[in-house]
Amino acid sequence: GEGGGEGGKWDLRVVESGFTDCRVETWANDTVRLQVGEHPAFSVTREQCIGVQFSPPPSRPRIHILTDYEVGHVLTYRPLGPLVAWLVEPPEVCRTCYQYVLENSGSFDLIFSHSDSFNALF
């Protein structure tokens, strides 16, 4: 793809609130669920598990994807490049996540969720 590093690849760096150790395979740490690893056009890495689950080449440019309870860390990740908000939980579970993204929408390059009405705001 355009703009990527070696071979045009980007590293999609997922920043999420995993509740288990990176070496344990469970629902909250399922490398299959997040499709961690190499793909034809990009790679996927869990921020807190670099070097344990998968390590992309350091020269590969990154897109940070902040999920749910991590969206409040926008100031930490904004200077590092493209930034995505991915609201996985429904508004009924994480109302403050949706409110934060709504109030700080200009800080994200892309916002998506499972709520069509919320997505329509952007």
Image (cartoon, rainbow, N blue to C red):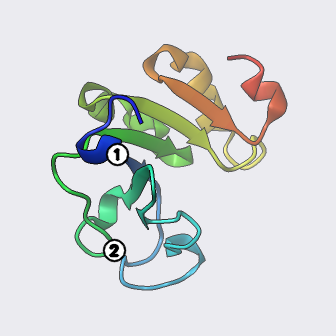
Which residue position is annotated with label 2? Answer: 53
Give the residue type at disc 2.
Gln
Which residue position is annotated with label 1? Answer: 9
User: Residue 21 occupies which quadrant of the picture?
Assistant: bottom left
| Residue 82 appears in the figure | yes
Q: Is residue 41 above or below residue 37?
A: above
Q: CA–CA distance between discs 2 and 1? A: 19 Å
Helix, strand or loop at label 2? It is loop
Q: Is residue 115 above or below residue 37?
A: above
**Residue at the image position 55 percent from the left and 71 percent from the top:** 28
Give the residue type at disc 1.
Lys
Q: Return the mark for residue 92.
A: none
Between 60 and 28, which is closer to the camera in this rendering? 60
Q: Are marks 2 and 1 in contact (CB under 8 Å)?
A: no
Q: Is residue 18 above or below residue 89?
A: below
Residue 14's x, y, as percent? 43, 51
Between 115 and 92, which is closer to the camera in this rendering? 115
